[in-house]
Image (cartoon, rainbow, N blue to C red):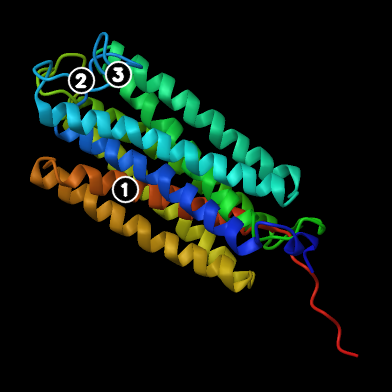
Amino acid sequence: MLTNLKKTPSLHTQRLLALILLLCQGGITVTGSIVRVTGSGLGCNTWPQCHEGSLVPVRGAAPLIHQAIEFGNRLLTFVLVAAVVAVFTGLVRAERRAELIAYALISGLGVVLQAVIGGISVKLDLQWWSVALHFLPSMVLVWVAALLYVRVAEPDDVSPVRAYPRAARWSAVVAACALAVVLVTGTMVTGAGPHAGDAEAGMSGRLDVNIDVMAHVHGYLMYAYLLCTFVTVVLLTRYRAPERARRAGLVLLGMIVVQAAIGIAQYRLGVPRWSVPMHIAMSSVVVACTAFLYAHGLVRQEAPARRP
């Protein structure tokens, strides 16, 4: 049995806190996309203040709705900080292993880094590459939070063992690398697209490439990622991997198909505003599910009790 079960907070509470952190890491990317598609990116035109000389919105400095959306997104950073602090404190009080503490620390440092990058992107008037650099670390933080959510349920006093064969694990790694490339090209499609992030910015500071070509490259890479994941699931089935690993693979396949469908709809409909938050939300879901599948490849599991 876990020795930490007798400590506070309980294992159930620790996992709940980890889940809240995961939801917050993914959720703030969605609110960030709402800032973008509503043209509210410069509703607060400086950082860390909202406007020069004021931490909060100023009447007349910019449209009130844009200030409210951008300032609201900034305030959510404090919710994320609270989630990180709660997880870190809970893990320390429960005297959990160093691996879990490291995930919590990475999450905390990542939030600080993201706040700085967000401020820099505002000062650069939302240049496409600065916005991309703001999004991609969020996906890394979603990955870390997903690993933490899986690992926190595992016992500390058991050594990790491989849950499925090396071939399947390497296939999962290749799929994760393919996902990384998909995410990078996705930011390039966004950078060349119609939503600059500020109502007055127009196409200034946008990526000067053929968006049709860029969208097709992104789409083809998504299919490659889907194929890599499919191969992984086939290998898991062939080698009779644990049920939770196979189930995670099947769920991931389903989420990729949903994400691909949203992306195709975006392209055919001309990237309507409402579709962007959906696509961003599914990006976090797909990243988390990919992390779940990867995490199930190396697990800490207590041996079943022997019958007398």
Q: Give the vertical position of 247 relative to 78 (above or below).
A: below
Whether residue 225 is visible, yes or no, is: no
Secondary element under disc 3, as helix, strand or loop, is loop
Is 25 situated left or right of 16 in this image?
A: left
Q: Mark 2 is on which residue type?
A: Leu
At a point 18% along the width and 22% down the height, the residue shown is: 43
Q: Quadrant of residue 151?
A: bottom right
Q: How far apart are labels 1 and 2 at the CA level?
A: 22 Å
Q: Give the vertical position of 266 relative to 155 (above or below).
A: above
Q: Mark 3 is on which residue type?
A: Leu
Is 185 situated left or right of 125 in this image?
A: right
At a point 41% along the width and 61% down the height, the residue shown is: 253
Residue on which disc 2 sits = 42
The front one of 211 and 199 is 199
The numbered dot on residue 281 is 1
Number of other residues with Cα within 10 Å of mark 2, as a class: few under 14, some 14 to 19, many 20 or more: many
* Dot placed on the residue nearer the N-terminal end, 1 or 3: 3
Q: Position of residue 185 (x, y in %)?
A: 34, 33
The numbered dot on residue 55 is 3
Whether residue 89 is visible, yes or no, is: yes
The front one of 208 and 283 is 283
Secondary element under disc 2, as helix, strand or loop, is loop
Q: Residue furthest top?
A: 52
At a point 12% along the width and 31% down the height, the residue shown is: 65
* Dot placed on the residue nearer the N-terminal end, 3 or 2: 2
At a point 25% along the width and 9% down the height, the residue shown is: 52
